Image (spheres, rainbow, N blue to C red):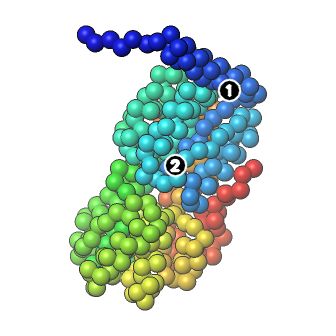
Amino acid sequence: MITQRIEPSQLSRVIIIGTVLSVLTLADCRQRQRPLYIVIPKSQANVFWQAIHAGAAAAAREGSVDIEWNAPAVETDYARQIAIVDDAINRHVDGIEVVPSDRTALVGAIHRARQAGIPVSVIDSGVNSEEYVSFVATDNYQGGVLASKRMAEILGRQGEVAIVAALPGAASAVEREQGFKDKLAKETPQIKIVAFQYGMADRAKSLAVSEDILTAHPGLAGIFASNEPSTIGAVQAVKSRGLAGKVEIVGFDTSPSLVDDLRAHTIDSLVLQDPFRIGYTGLKVLLDKRAGRNPPPRITLPPVLVTSDHAEAPQFQNLLHPEVQLP
């Protein structure tokens, strides 16, 4: 067996560094005046995540607790999201509300939180684990079904369509895409899915793959885009080719530009969620758990499809324009 001799000076440095880190961690815990919860979405870039932040902040204010908000710059940075969770565990926070970027990548981090006695709520997108208090999400499969039914209606139940997908492993988008495909195959087989490409939850990449699809399939009749960046990319591609109104778009989620395109009939319809309510409920279940109550293991919220003809309807405005201002 080979051993490495540690000089006294090296050992002293290791001890000092370890002591400093321990002191900082303890100081972080002792300086808190109120319980601290961490909210970790997939990224911080779009309206959906901002509305989740606002919802969690509203629940925190009601519960007299503090929250911190942290996320990777892009949804594909799984390592960064894991590091944020691990940092929260090392700081011994009172709870973690997280949107897993990938169904499997975050399983180990959630397990470590459970071992540390830190409750976790998983929101919006699923994970291959049951080591959480509650899973709070839209019925994403049903959202895909709604999109499929609308596409069949506007295309007269025939034609070629494409799917601009989010990214592999993103459970929420995968469910939407599967719901769309299953419903078409079961009830409208005359509509053929001729292309399926990932936009990687990025607007520029979604634009590029949408342009590739339009080039390869000049007879394309419709596009289903399964999240906000993919919808924005698809719309930009259709507009740049002068195909607005000729290639029908059914998208998912909202943003100010998507609402404008919906009103202009460039987008036929959007499947909408309630991100404020998701963020609020995701923190509320953690507060209930802290209070000794047992929240349900799964809370499912219904999706809503809004067409361009109903973009101004009062009952849809809170979904088209979700609350993003922090209380």
Element type at mark 1: helix
Is 8 above or below relative to 67?
A: above
Check disc 1 and report the residue beneath it.
28
Is 118 above or below relative to 121?
A: above
Sort mark 1 into few (<14), some (14-19) or many (20+) by Cα contacts within 10 Å: few
The answer to whether residue 158 shows anywhere in this view is: no
> Residue 89: x and y, percent?
54, 28
Q: Residue at x 51, y 75 (%)?
A: 307
Disc 2 marks a residue whose amino acid type is: Pro
217 or 224: nearer the viewer: 217
Q: Quadrant of residue 217?
A: bottom left
Q: Residue at x 50, y 16 (%)?
A: 10
Check disc 2 and report the residue beneath it.
72
Q: Quadrant of residue 94?
A: top right
Q: Earlier in the sequence, mark 2 or mark 1?
A: 1
The answer to whether residue 84 shows anywhere in this view is: yes
134 or 24: nearer the viewer: 24
> Residue 68: x and y, percent?
65, 40
